Image (cartoon, grey):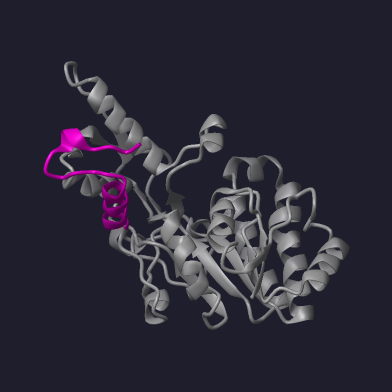
Amino acid sequence: MRIMLTGAGGFLGSRLLLYYQEKYEVFAPSRRELDFTCEEAVTEAVGAFRPDVLIHCGAISDVGVCERDPEGSMRVNVEGTRNLARACGQVGARMVMCSSDQVYFRKAAEGEGREEFLRPHREEERCNPLPLYGRHKLLAEEACLTGQPDSVILRLTWMYGELTEEERKKGRKNLAVLLEEMYAQRQETMKQEKKKLSFSETDYRGVTDVGEVVRRMEDAWKLPPGIYNFGSPASGSMYECVRGALESLGMEDMAEPSEGSGGLRNLGMDPEKTARAGIRFPDSAEGLRRYLESLGACPEDPRSISLA
């Protein structure tokens, strides 16, 4: 089986490459090797390799960068996706596009109550995202399904996982790294006043172990064409999620609530459609707890937890 992968230098793409390159023939061109915003170059590359599956992870995913450079975001996130989808359509390759839960980031409708606003999002609902990144991802989804109707669109949550030394040197962080720092602080301040980290009580979203997404990608490219919420459902607010994950480890006192900024936000996704297809993710708090325990956490003695 032949797999083509864009964005192999990113958080998800690098892990997909590492996981699948021993099992399949994988072509993962760098940005220098393939500028997928150039339609001619994409047509040539896809036509030459003729993949069975093309997994498109490449994107400008920094929301702030997209806002500051809307033309660049349009060129990479939308037009680049369109080029890849058309090329896949021409050679009959299945395309898997990595989209985002940001397509669900919207304001509450007039008269909409809190309970209704916080209802988990479903794939078929009408989206009207606030951030430019979310709007461009939505346009990219449409371009993907138009260029290659046999595509699978995965709306991904925020992901976490261990970082490589190179990623750490670049200052990258995710939820797992924050919790690792919490533990380090706990050990450092055993004889001092305990420090805490604040997590938003107004931000509702799922968070998923990147390893779970990588392992399930093989099932994802076999799904019927369409759009899928792909990741862990939310466990309440981010504060409730983190506290729930830390509770069994005896570390819940390290997290405290905050109101966050920008008011109530709901990016939580309903996983029913994906689950019906046989792909299930644990809810965010449970998945996070499992991840921490897999790194050596011992609930019986929180002092022995090792997140190294």
At 47% from the left and 72% from the top, the residue drawn is 123
Q: Quadrant of residue 113?
A: bottom left
**Residue 15 in the image, given as x and y percentages of width and height:** 53, 54
Q: Residue furthest front?
A: 22
At 71% from the left and 73% from the top, the residue drawn is 51
Q: Compared with residue 191, is residue 304 higher up or lower down, i.e. above or below? A: below
Question: What range is drawn magenta here?
Answer: 284-308
What count of labels does the image hold?
Answer: 0
Q: Residue furthest right?
A: 40
- Would residue 233 be seen by someone viewing this image from the given angle? yes
**Residue 87 in the image, given as x and y percentages of width and height:** 78, 72
| Drawn side of residue 69 relative to residue 264, left or right | right
Nearer-the-camera pick, 19 or 132: 19
- Would residue 195 be seen by someone viewing this image from the given angle? no
Image quadrant occupied by the N terminus? bottom right
| Drawn side of residue 250 relative to residue 160, left or right | left
Q: Compared with residue 5, is residue 189 higher up or lower down, i.e. above or below? A: above
Q: Compared with residue 239, is residue 182 higher up or lower down, i.e. above or below? A: above
**Residue 235 in the image, given as x and y percentages of width and height:** 28, 56
Q: Is residue 294 a member of the stretch shown in magenta?
A: yes
**Residue 130 in the image, given as x and y percentages of width and height:** 54, 53
Q: Quadrant of residue 166?
A: top right
Q: Residue furthest top?
A: 192
Nearer-the-camera pick, 73 or 225: 225
Q: Is residue 296 a member of the stretch shown in magenta?
A: yes
Image quadrant occupied by the C terminus? top left
At 40% from the left and 38% from the top, the residue drawn is 177
